[in-house]
Image (cartoon, grey):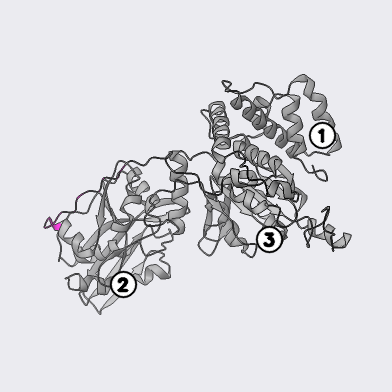
């Protein structure tokens, strides 16, 4: 007898429907799974067999063939345990039920309990898009699945409970999720008010947050670079609902979504160690998984001790910094992950950290300093909008008991600037000034006539590349938006003034364009 049950697979960050066909026929006892399964799917046989028996059903000693269709789509993960078990019970005639119009997702324990499964959100989303009426998911993942509207989500605690539901003996009620408030969370990270001194660096961080720009801090050890970077989330605007769903999909597929957090509402802040592999940074593996650049999507990727990451590891950042996506190609095909993040990096000026320090002598030779700084290539530096020096903090500022400007005050200016940008880019996929291409720069980054000579001089003296030229204009546009939002102007300033352009130019490195 043949039974058909619907399930789902995850390809990249998107779901794909999978048909689970189970046939039980006379012959020597055997359990075959076909349809391009990976090792974890093949092991389903060893989980499903005791799960079926321990749920009160008989596991027939016959030839059982499970086909996962389409056959050319790679099947990975344990999410097929539940649909395979349901198919076996239906095919053996021990349960009579109509399972058309429903998908079944979940890993089985040996006692028949349905366990947490990664990737529930994109799988339920594709089921809804394909007109599926109901989704049977693990009880631990029901809140995550309920984020998808327009489909009945039914929490399944065990295979036995599911069988009683399908037979009508004990119906499991549909789960109705609660509305999620996006703007109620307190921002994460240290408050700017507790960061002593470094006012010009705080200003650079504010500009970076307002426009989504990349930033590099250079200074001696102990000057506060790491603390300033970790304060960045406290001034970032809250995520929109669409952004939160995007980030939640990534964390769900990666298996990093906490069971008590069905929706990621805080902007991500990722700070990998410099010993991370290239695959860990940008994604990869035999069957590609998101890396740190994708886990930082809509948030901040903080790279401390930037030169220590190695040339090969840093060069792979060039494509996601430019295209906002990561494409990983394998023989079986390619997968694209989103990577629209802010890069915040910190480095010492030399291996000992005190090159140029007024109080402590540097012990590095000029050649060693040059080699250390050259670990970061010119093309990568050219993709960083803001370069800022972080000097040693003076005793007077450290011992001052007065608090600085709070992150709340800075965040209000940042959010007002982002509102201006969203209005400017309404109707497009752009969300901030850093996302602008050359077309938008030409349209929205008009420089007033009196500032043209300043821009021309900067182009010549800094030997700016075309990319550096456009990045200065985008940065100046953000500074103008911040200036307009502080005065509560409507729609932002139409042109970029000399003052806005001068501040943007000072953030460029003096050695590279």
* As drawn, 282 above or below 471: below
Q: Nearer the viewer, mark 2 or mark 3?
A: 3
Relative vertical location of residue 431 with respect to residue 270 in this rendering, above or below: above
Residue 309 - label: 3
Q: Position of residue 156 (x, y in %)?
A: 25, 58
Q: Which residue is mark 2?
A: 47
Residue 385 in sight in this render? no
Q: Nearer the viewer, residue 216 or 320?
A: 216
Classify mark 3: residues with Cα within 10 Å, few (<14), some (14-19) or many (20+). many
Q: Is residue 168 magenta?
A: yes
First of labels 2, 3 by sequence position: 2
Query: Left or right: 131 with respect to 388?
Result: left
* Real-space Cα separation, disc 2 to disc 1, in angstroms: 66 Å
At 71% across and 32% down in the image, what residue appears? Answer: 473
Location of the C terminus (image quadrant): top right
Residue depicted at 72% across the width and 34% down the height = 470
Chief secondary structure of the magenta portion? loop
Position of 143 with respect to 506 (left or right) is left
Circle number at residue 459? 1
């Amino acid at each position: 007898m043949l039974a058909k049950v619907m399930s789902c697979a995850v390809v990249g960050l998107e779901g794909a429907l999978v048909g689970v066909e189970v046939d039980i026929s006379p012959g020597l006892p055997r359990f075959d799974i076909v349809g391009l399964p990976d090792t974890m799917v093949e092991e389903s046989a060893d989980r499903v067999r005791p799960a079926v028996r321990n749920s009160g059903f008989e596991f027939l000693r016959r030839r059982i063939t499970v086909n996962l269709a389409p056959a050319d789509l790679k099947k990975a993960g344990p999410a097929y345990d539940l649909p395979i078990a349901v198919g076996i019970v239906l095919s053996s005639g021990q349960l009579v039920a109509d399972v058309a119009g429903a998908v079944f997702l979940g890993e089985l324990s040996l006692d028949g309990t349905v366990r947490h499964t990664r990737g529930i959100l994109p799988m339920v989303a594709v089921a809804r898009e394909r007109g599926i009426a109901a989704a049977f998911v693990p009880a631990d993942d029901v809140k995550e699945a309920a984020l998808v509207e327009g489909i009945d989500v039914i929490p399944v605690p065990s295979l036995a409970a599911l069988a009683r539901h399908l037979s009508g003996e004990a119906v499991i009620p549909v789960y109705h999720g609660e509305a999620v408030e996006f703007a109620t969370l307190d921002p994460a990270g240290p408050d700017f008010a507790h960061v002593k001194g470094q006012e010009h660096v705080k200003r650079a961080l504010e500009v970076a947050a307002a426009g989504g720009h990349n930033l590099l801090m250079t200074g001696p050890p102990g000057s506060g670079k790491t603390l300033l970077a970790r304060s960045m989330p406290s001034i970032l605007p809250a995520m929109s609902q669409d952004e939160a769903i995007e980030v939640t999909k990534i964390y769900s597929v990666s298996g990093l979504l906490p069971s008590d957090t069905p929706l990621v509402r805080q902007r991500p802040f990722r700070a990998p160690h410099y010993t991370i592999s290239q695959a860990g940074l940008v994604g990869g593996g035999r069957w590609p998984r998101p890396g740190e650049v994708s886990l930082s999507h809509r948030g901040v990727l903080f790279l401390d001790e930037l030169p220590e990451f190695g040339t090969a590891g840093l060069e792979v950042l060039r494509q996601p910094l430019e295209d906002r996506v990561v494409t990983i190609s394998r023989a079986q095909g390619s997968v694209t992950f989103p990577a629209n993040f802010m890069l915040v990096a910190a480095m010492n000026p030399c291996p000992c950290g005190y090159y140029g320090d007024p109080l402590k002598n540097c012990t590095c030779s000029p050649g060693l300093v040059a080699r250390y700084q050259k670990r970061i290539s010119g093309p990568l530096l050219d993709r960083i909008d803001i370069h800022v020096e972080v000097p040693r903090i003076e005793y007077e500022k450290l011992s001052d008991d007065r608090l600085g400007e709070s992150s709340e005050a800075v965040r209000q200016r940042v959010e007002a600037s982002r509102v201006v940008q969203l209005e400017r880019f309404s109707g497009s996929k752009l969300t901030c000034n850093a996302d602008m291409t050359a077309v938008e720069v030409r349209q929205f980054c008009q420089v007033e006539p009196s500032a043209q000579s300043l821009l021309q001089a900067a182009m010549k003296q800094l030997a700016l590349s075309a990319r550096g030229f456009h990045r200065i204009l985008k940065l100046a546009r953000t500074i103008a938006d911040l200036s307009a939002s502080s005065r509560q102007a409507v729609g932002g300033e139409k042109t970029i003034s000399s003052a806005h352009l001068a501040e943007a130019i000072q953030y460029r490195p003096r050695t590279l364009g």
